[in-house]
Amino acid sequence: GAVVSQHPSRVICKSGTSVKIECRSLDFQATTMFWYRQFPKQSLMLMATSNEGSKATYEQGVEKDKFLINHASLTLSTLTVTSAHPEDSSFYICSARGPPAGGLDEQFFGPGTRLTVL
Amino acid sequence: GQSLEQPSEVTAVEGAIVQINCTYQTSGFYGLSWYQQHDGGAPTFLSYNALDGLEETGRFSSFLSRSDSYGYLLLQELQMKDSASYFCAVPTGANNLFFGTGTRLTVIP
């Protein structure tokens, strides 16, 4: 199946700093990628949809100026958490819509990035 | 709005069968997917039902009843490695996924 990577896998930063997370589709082109956030023992919540060459679409309640998304190429999307605070500590997961298979547009998920803000 | 409700936790014995239910309320329905997620890992796709009935893939089966807004994931011959969180999810009109509340399955010897 299609492979999606994320970097870094875990990051610890000080409050007030910015952190960039990369999401790459390794063996396919992804015009659309998605960013999710998952707090401990909770479900995945969609933060935004990242479209190559255009602005991201943010879900209600997600601050676009705090969570900057750039989808500069068909294989790379980045999420930058600006001025991070402890409440931003979470598991951030990206996914990319892969090539259709059997009529199903399947999403392939990256391994996630564990962000801890001190 | 949308909601997908699942039991929060299920415990079952190795070798047994377990059923994880998902009831949904959505504006527009395109099908029901199931994902498995081990702690600290990525969700992995298990199955997808667009039509009513049972879909079988090895030890895992998934069922959908659109008239009841209900589906379930059936895991047979449980193994210790099946201990994980399981999420139902629906594609939305915006072509993304909305996930259920999740069920943490613990398999015991």
Image (spheres, rainbow, N blue to C red):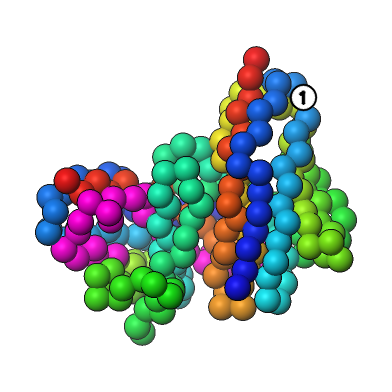
Q: Position of residue B56 (x, y in %)?
A: 81, 46
Q: Can residue B52 be seen?
A: yes
A14 or B93: nearer the eye?
A: A14
Q: Residue at x 53, y 43 (%)?
A: B37
Horizontal side, residue B29 vs residue A79: left or right: right
Horizontal side, residue A105 vs residue B48: left or right: left
Q: Position of residue A56 (x, y in %)?
A: 37, 78
Q: Position of residue A114 (x, y in %)?
A: 32, 46
Where on the picture, by quarter, is residue B66? bottom right
User: Of all residues shown, which one is farthest toward the bottom?
Assistant: A54
* Subunit bearing disc 1: B
Q: Can residue B51 be seen?
A: no
Q: Position of residue A53 (x, y in %)?
A: 35, 83
Where on the picture, by quarter, is residue A68? bottom left
* Rendered view: B12 above or below B72: above
Q: Residue at x 42, y 44 (%)?
A: A40
Where on the picture, by quarter, is residue A81? bottom left
Q: Residue at x 28, y 50 (%)?
A: A89
The verdict on residue A104 being magenta is yes
User: Disc 1 on helix, strand or loop?
Assistant: loop
The verdict on residue A97 being magenta is yes
Circle 1: is it few (<14), some (14-19), or many (20+) Cα within 10 Å? few
* Rendered view: B102 above or below A97: above
Q: Which residues are magenta?
A: A79-105
Residue at image mark 1: B16
